[in-house]
Amino acid sequence: MTRHLRVDEPIHDSPLDQMAQGVLGQPLNRLEGPLKVSGRATYAAESRPRGMAYGVLVQAAIPAGKVLGIEDAPGAIAVIQDKRMIRYAAQGLAEEGPKAGPEEVEYMGQAIALVVADSLEAARHAAQNLKIRYDVQDVPVDPTAVVPELPPKKQSSTGDLDKAMQQAPFSVDAVWHTPTHAAAAMEPHAAIAEWDGDSVTIRAGLQMLSSNRKQMADALGIRPKKLRLLAPYVGGGFGSKLGINAEAVAAAIAARELGRPVQVVMTRQQVFDLAHRRSETRQRIRLACDHEGRLTGIGHEALVSNLPGSDFSEPVTQATPFTYAAAHRQIVHAVARIHRSCAGSVRAPGEAVGVTVFECALDELAEAADIDPVALRLRNIPTVEPDTERPFSSHKLAEALHEGAERFNWSERRPPRQRVEGEWFIGMGMATAVRVNQLVEARAKVTLGPDGRAIVETDMTDIGTGTYTILGQIAAEALGLPQERVEVRLGDTDFPPATGSGGSFGAASSGTSVYLACEEVRQQIAKAMGCEAVDLTLQNGLARAGNVEKPLSDVIQSPLVGEGYVEPGKTEKSVRQATWGSHWAEVAVNRWTGEVRVRRMLGLFSCGRILNEKTARSQCLGGMVFGMGIALTEALEHDPRDGHAVTRDLGEYHIPCHADVPHLEVHFVPERDPYVGPLQAKGIGELSICGSGAAILNAIHNACGIRVRDLPATPDKIIAALDP
Amino acid sequence: MDITLDLNGTSHRLDVDPRTTLLDALRHDLGLTGTKKGCDHGQCGACTVLMDGRRINSCLTLACMAEGKEITTIEGIGTPDQLSPLQQQFLDHDGFQCGYCTPGQICSATAMLEEIAAGWPSHASGSLEGPFDLSHAEIAERMSGNLCRCAAYSNIVAAIRQAAKADALHKDAA
């Protein structure tokens, strides 16, 4: 039986709090951890079906045009150019395959063919020596050189911002630039496809199997039930594996054509070209406030880019309308249609760059108005969502600001250039963290055996997020079992569909479906015990009701199966759901070299119920460091002539490394959010990026007096502005 | 070409393409996929293995160059049921998330601690002569060849320091 919940009403009293196992929320080690630390967890390219051939993707060397012909290569079994091969990855949650047809090129680096050989060495050599003839087309590649689209639904205006700016005693009006960012997950995109008759099994690095299955079936022209996707372990996603990509489609086509399994692994450079990039942004922020620091005007104008016809555009201003209140507001969202690689979701699309820039602007306003940056934020927290006047589901920004200031010793902050240690300027900065929250559809199945062991099954993925562990903890809590007696099986489309990992909705959504499946099983146990489910206590494999206590093995004769299905309901619209927090950073800026060293960072986050304190903390560490990359090092540079990504490897696209990262401190603000269902838990994986870079950039200003508005704040930009 | 690899204490005969890297020989020919390919260019450290006890990028080493050397991969360091002390510390400190860079981090850290014990200085060391303080900065500097996009860095350094501390106590007691 399926237990269904549509979240239409808040659930203030969570039944999970009545349960006795006491395992939920505990900082337990990861269930799959022993496999990962011993190298036994198997990722996408890590099975070896008999007779497997190796495929290497061939990329277009022109910015746009037509492929006229490809000369066959010696050493290859086949050079595959199939009209079903896709031009770019599917966007997250797309129901269909992305645009296909590799003979037309839309950006430099697009996949146009697959070379297959018996070994990787032979395939790689053949792919590098193909002779390809093109018809080259002249196309725009610079977002500032075209007239952008202004999608009407993405513009909004309240009051008269121009007037508010003129009349305000203090204001900021400036432009920031953020470059293209890459997800750069450590596991390159990879797939192994194997056909059995007219059915295919594809093992791949994917974040969202249920929609990936629809995309892949559509791309290949087969029915979804003829396709099984496997992604038991995913070596990082950060958005780059939300939708199917070229390697998996090509592997399936080649395997079919050659009648043998085919493995295709992208090179690191191909990952930079073919995985969705986070669009570069140009952001103009206008802020106006009165003498007390009350905001009277907020303007946020964003210019982003994508390929012509691509639906996705980086939602830069997503959090701006509800983060702070002001009577006069304006949002502008412009999209330049250019031929750089496809833009899509990279961890915290929108807020990662939108909140970062906005929080830098707010720091400039605080300076202009001579108000402490923390006080400025506290003064402008709205009581309801501006414009819609909807209540917030829960709102802990003020707590996060107060507690953060205290823990970080914010009161020790001095004016710019006042703290000097040798050749280093020392400064402190802070920023608000905010990210929208969402619940999505999810299903799961739970089986409890007479031996007192439970199995959780869902096609949800664990991309490093801790999903195996938290789903196990939820089931262990609800069924009264020690954690080691719960087995969690993920990443297989044979299991009930969850929406997947993305948008920070995975844990709360699939967690709720697991909880509901357990409720169903509890109902069956209660029936066997002759009691109501509310009167049943399950703990350490014992079932208790009234004065009766029995081991589960005495209660259950055959396995009990429950299914859970959650979907968002009225609370999605009736309240504004978001997660909140605060970022704090102390940096040292070298007065001669412009080098920035992050000396300490602290983050406070409120994300509803914390399901596992250890894995939740790790998610926050990861986000804070992602933000450090945005502030200091990361830029995927495009060649102005043809738009191709120049810094397309890990030697040139600088993600933070060990030596960049000091010991980081993470704390959670206690919170439960009743509007997201019985779990009362919200998203966690993205909040910690949103604003983290701003705390660092604001600290740079506090250290040496320099505002870097063209991110990242590399030494060349700082040294150019330094007056030692 | 025929080569013989001395791998995790066992000898393996292989017929490989001369262009085969040690990394691809491990993953494709021997099915030892614990060693990861992250960049194939020596930029990320995910493919780190030990060659005669020293950490190397197996993607920058041809398989035929590894003949006559003792190779240790993550599979030779511990098993899920019998983790090495360092692997256990990674687990306890949550020194990983997606787990893809993890075998490389652990192989690298295993050799790195030996380098410190042997008195090799680093950029972060206060002097050229050991012994060296196992500070956060010292460990982080020495581990910077191993990238982690999940950014478990704080936890990795804590895991390594704890493992080194426990090892030192163990040695003192012995």
Image: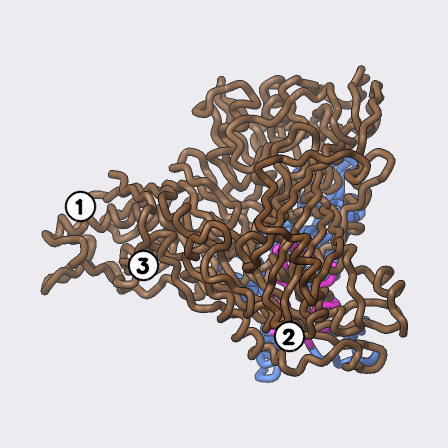
Q: Which percent across, then down, holds residue A94?
A: 53, 32
Mark 2 sits on what residue?
A372
Q: Please check whether the numbered discs 3 and 2 fall on a single chain.
A: yes
Question: In the image as oriented, which residue stretches furthest toward the top?
Answer: A68
Q: Is mark 1 on a helix, strand or loop?
A: loop
Give A724 or A550, whichever is nearer the viewer. Answer: A724
Name the mark nearer the viewer: 1 or 3: 3
Name the mark nearer the viewer: 3 or 2: 2
Q: Please check whether the numbered discs 1 and 2 fall on a single chain.
A: yes
Label 1 chain ID: A
Determine if residue B174 is in view. yes
Mark toward the start of the polypeptide (3 vs 2): 2
Chain part drawn in magenta: B135-161
Determine if residue A488 is in view. no
Tell me whether circle 3 and circle 2 mark residues in contact (CB < 8 Å). Answer: no
Distance of mark 1 from mark 2, alpha carbons? 66 Å
Up-down relation of residue A52 to residue A321 (above or below)? above
